[in-house]
Amino acid sequence: MLRELLANLPKPDHNADLLVGHETGDDAAVYRIDETRAMVATTDFFMPLVDDPFDFGRISATNALSDVYAVGGRPVLALAIVGMPVDKVSTATIQQVLAGGAAVCKAAGVPIAGGHSIDTLEPIYGLAVIGMVDIKNIKRNIGARPGDALILGKAIGTGFLASAMKAGTLSPDGYREMIDCTTRLNDIGAELGERADIHAMTDITGFGLLGHLSEVCQGSHVAARLDLGAVPMLSAGRELAQAGVNTGATGRNRAEFSAGVALPGDLPDWQNNMLYDPQTAGPLLVACDPGAADEVLALFHARGFDAAAIIGHCHPGEPIITVSSIITVS
């Protein structure tokens, strides 16, 4: 739908200082401010995934900041975006949402300098974020090369957890796993941006792993082989997927991207769904020189991304993703 909405918009006049726009679906816009530096701009907001207002604020802020990290930048300033049904939600609850977002921004070293609020039918919260990046360090979701290793920074499965949360069936352990994952900042992205051996980077969000990897392959003109057994999955998310929990966005992602994906014919439905599961504040996906893969993976682990793993490789060919194995269930 987003592509259809953008397709008929008048093309903007060429601006040599706009280094990254929306053409390839990159995570943020990047605008040159001088010979060596550029400004990064993004916005993200959504309705509550959880009942706890403080956690809702934390998740939303983490998700918004991730877009800056995904292009190799450092966020420097944020503005709050708030829509609340003021006749239904108390001032104290709204304050807790804002406090959650502020806590994450403080941890990231980012001041919330203001924002805008309106009266809405449903609660909405998020951030508009400005960041900075050295031009030579800009990472995009294009630029992956044949032979590159694919590294995923966090486990996937938050879509299943959010679905169970809405249904009132998420266990306390599952809730803790969801919060731990969705409030973990992808701040390692700024360090990864400094590495010339990293050729492409994006964060996995609403399109799911296969959707965002498809964008990398299409924009980079490479194929990819994905080792399903190596893909880290949240344990509670995996259990819910096996139990048949699903989301509407999973089906939409499959309809949009399946033409560029080759899956084993006997792949169980839950594994298929996991690969298309939409993520919130999801992991970074990195395409790096194969000779640097172990070093980059060790950097993830040293920074506390314990689930990070090498999940596949790029190779020459049409932009098709081939899933090469089926994970076993103990």
Image (tube, rainbow, N blue to C red):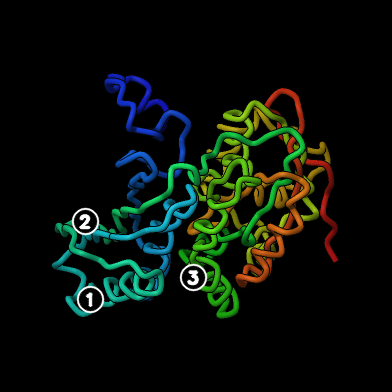
Which residue type carries mark 3?
A: Gly
Question: Going 72% across and 50% down the picture, which residue do you hit?
Answer: 271
Which residue type carries mark 2?
A: Leu
- Name the residue tied to disc 3: 168
Measure how far apart labels 2 and 3 are at the Cα level.
Answer: 22 Å
Measure how far apart labels 1 and 2 are at the Cα level.
Answer: 18 Å
Callout 2–callout 3 Cβ contact below 8 Å: no
The quadrant the C terminus occupies is bottom right
Instruction: Classify 10 Å Cα crowding around label 3: few (below 14), some (14-19), many (20 and above).
Output: few
Give the label, 3 or 1, closer to the camera: 1
The residue nearer to you, when weighing 261 against 142, is 142
Question: Going 77% across and 39% down the picture, which residue do you hit?
Answer: 225
94 displayed left or right of 324? left
The quadrant the N terminus occupies is top left
Residue 114 appears in which quarter of the rendering?
bottom left
- Asked which secondary structure carries label 1, the reply is helix
- Name the residue tied to disc 1: 95
Q: Name the spot of residue 246 as percent of width and height, x first.
A: 58, 53
Give the label, 1 or 2, closer to the camera: 1
- Name the residue tied to disc 2: 121
Which residue type carries mark 1?
A: Gln
Measure how far apart labels 3 and 1 are at the Cα level.
Answer: 24 Å
- Asked which secondary structure carries label 2, the reply is loop
